[in-house]
Amino acid sequence: MAEPAAVTRIDVRPAGDAPYSVQVGVGLLGDLVDTVQAVSAATRIAVLHPRALLATAETLREELSASAGHPEVVLLEVPDGEDAKDLPVAAYAWSVLGKVGFTRDDLVIGLGGGAVTDLAGFVAATWLRGVRVIHVPTTLLAMVDAAVGGKTAINTEAGKNLVGAFHQPAAVLCDLATLDTLPAEEFTAGLAEVVKTGLIADPVILDLLEDDPTGRSHLRELIERSIAVKADVVSADPKESGRREILNYGHTLGHAIERAEHYRWRHGAAVSVGLVFAGALSRRAAGLDDATADRHRELLTRIGLPVSYPADRWPELADAMRVDKKARAKRLRFVVLSGLAQPRILDDPDPEVLLAAYGEVAS
Ligand SMILES: NC(=O)c1ccc[n+]([C@@H]2O[C@H](COP(=O)([O-])OP(=O)(O)OC[C@H]3O[C@@H](n4cnc5c(N)ncnc54)[C@H](O)[C@@H]3O)[C@@H](O)[C@H]2O)c1
């Protein structure tokens, strides 16, 4: 697909919250002033960003400060990666908002990967019980997943993402040009969520990735299709009381692997193994055909993502899955496929079937 210069707008209409647009395009950061003015009359704006995006944040500050009304713009640099999603960092952000006299009309901007958009969303959700936030995701994973849908969180001693709130953004701006500086392994990890979306809802995504497993030649279409699925699911079930659970395909085992690896594996890498496991489980317990189950491993391997995990770690992973926040009353729940793009829930599966499915990813 040729890349049009125009901006694509994908609407999210979460019941009970204001609708918003996810904009996708190349060189969109210059449109941020217009987006800010369309959704808020802020006189103070706080931009949360990692060190890697300092230069971008400074450019945004100049443009926003020079815009109509001359809002006061403060830059809050936060630690890199998961270290941003920490209570002292949120407390630091709250203290800055307090110092500049942030009111309900003011605006938080999350500029960065999913760690920053999760933190920025959390800070915005909690300050004065909720101020507006605009997300400017700069990783593939944040564009197709973290920045869309209103889940915000920080990590605590008790675990990852256990403290948070649902807080929908007022707008999301995906500038594909920001991906130019993203390290290759971060980009590849983001493709795991794109594959997941293809498997649960939009098989054209799989065709596009099979045509070019680097994801580069169809990048814009892959991102737009993935966001469209997420927007649709989140609009139907903003607070994860039903359909939204399908987005967790591959994540039950994926989260257990992240935990077993003390969060040193990238989320997408752990999800990749989880997807192969979910395909194997779907074949054994939900009637998924062999070709589609095998397609999980073949595609993820071609992309360069991991598809196996040590055989002897199963007891530890099974224990971790039971305490996952997606488990209910310690009964394991999995999203499985009964066919391509036909997800459903498998509740409390036979442990023997789980072990056999793990056999397909065990190395
Ligand atoms: N809220 C949700 O629905 C949701 C969904 C999925 C994931 N998440 C969360 O997202 C986080 C992972 O997000 P991520 O994969 O984007 O990782 P990340 O935010 O840690 O970013 C990865 C790395 O890339 C750097 N980076 C970001 N953009 C860059 C750019 N354009 N150029 C150069 N470097 C750049 C970051 O500084 C960081 O070092 C996790 O905390 C996960 O829990 C949230």
Image: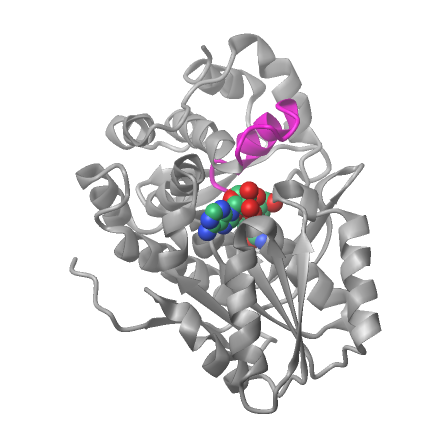
Which residue range is magenta in the image? Answer: 245-266
Q: Which quarter of the image is occupied by the N terminus?
A: bottom left
Is 184 part of what is drawn in magenta? no
> In the rendered image, is residue 246 in sight?
no
The x and y percentages for residue 143 are: 45, 56
- Magenta region's main secondary structure? helix
Nearest the viewer among 176 and 289 is 176
Nearest the viewer among 54 and 252 is 54
Is 249 part of what is drawn in magenta? yes
User: Does 107 sit left or right of 362 as displayed?
Assistant: right
User: Does 312 sit left or right of 285 as displayed?
Assistant: right
* Residue lying at the far bottom of the rendered structure: 69
Image height of 51 relative to 39, above or below: above
Q: Residue 308, located in which quarter of the rendered image?
A: top left
The x and y percentages for residue 31 are: 42, 76
Q: Residue 186, located in which quarter of the rendered image?
A: top left
Query: Could you tell me which residue is drawn at 31 percent across and 32 percent down?
Result: 303
Q: Which quarter of the image is occupied by the C terminus?
A: top left
Image height of 126 relative to 314, above or below: below
The x and y percentages for residue 115 are: 60, 49
